Image (cartoon, rainbow, N blue to C red):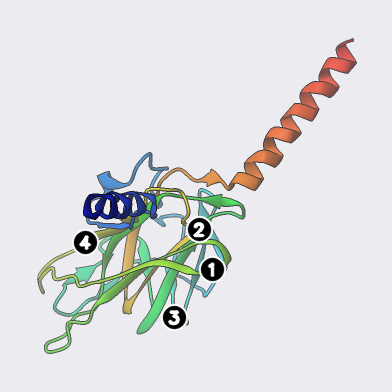
Amino acid sequence: MKLRFIAAALALAAALPAHAVLVNNAAAIPSPIPAINFDAFDGLITTGPEPVGNGIMFTGDQGSELGAFIADLGNNGLWGAGNSFVAGGAIGELRFTLADGFFSSGGGALVNHVSVPGFPFSMVISAYGENNQIIETHTFSVSTGVNSLNQGLFAGIVRPQADIRAISFKGNSVVLDNLVFATPVPEPGTAALMLAGLAVAGFMAGRRRG
């Protein structure tokens, strides 16, 4: 009886969806699309929505800047010196959303934040699924040193299935660069419509040839 119970519990655990993983290495993002470095922007103050490349849309809180070129992070050093990046407001969110109908299995970016004596502050990375619902969220801190330049921590989320529609970073004056996503794939309904469209196109082409 006990063995049967254990076997049933193991089977149930195997059937449950796997939890996401917080990763700190860009190489952990599977089949990544080209990273976005925000060099195409020049100090654009915006809350979005603003396309940033690869079908990805940016939205942010008040004071967000695309193509920022200087940021004093206090105990975490400086960002800038010819390096363009995204900068958030005092306390805010930087969110990146895939094109409608597409989902990814992972994404992340090189990040840092303002740190002052006695108030190191933490960052939060969240993954959003369908209907803008949070499916994973993790809290972490970055410490790079007061004399560092353009240093940070890669923070990303990887999931066993492609169900991420957007990823956001929140914290105290967050800075972010080299955003990357795993290759987006269409949701099942979208894929079915695409296949149906291709089948109809092929059928019509065959009729024209006949």
Regarding mark 4 in the picture, which secondary structure is present there? strand
- Give coordinates of residue 75: x percent, y percent: 13, 78
Residue labelled with disc 1: 132
Question: Where residue 38 appears, x then y in whole percent?
Answer: 41, 57
Classed neighbour count for the residue bearing mark 3: other residues with Cα under 10 Å, few (<14), some (14–19), many (≥20): some
Q: Residue 42, position in %: x, y?
A: 45, 64
Q: Is residue 147 above or below residue 52?
A: below
* Nearest the eye: 178 or 198: 198
Q: Are marks 2 and 3 in contact (CB under 8 Å)?
A: no
Which mark's residue is nearer the viewer, 4 or 3?
A: 4
Residue occupying the far front of the picture: 1
Residue under circle 4?
A: 153
Mark closer to the observer (2, 3)? 2
Residue at 73% from the left image edge and 34% from the top image edge: 196
Which structural element holds mark 1? Answer: helix
**SS under mark 2:** loop
Residue under circle 3?
Answer: 63
Amino acid carrying label 3: it is Gly
- SS state under label 3: loop
Could you say which is closer to the camera, residue 30 or residue 115? 30
Q: Residue at left 24%, top 67%?
A: 79
- Residue at the spot of label 2: 165
Q: Earlier in the sequence, mark 1 or mark 2?
A: 1
Q: Nearer the viewer, residue 7 or 73?
A: 7
Q: Residues within 10 Å of mark 2 (few under 14, many from 20)?
A: many
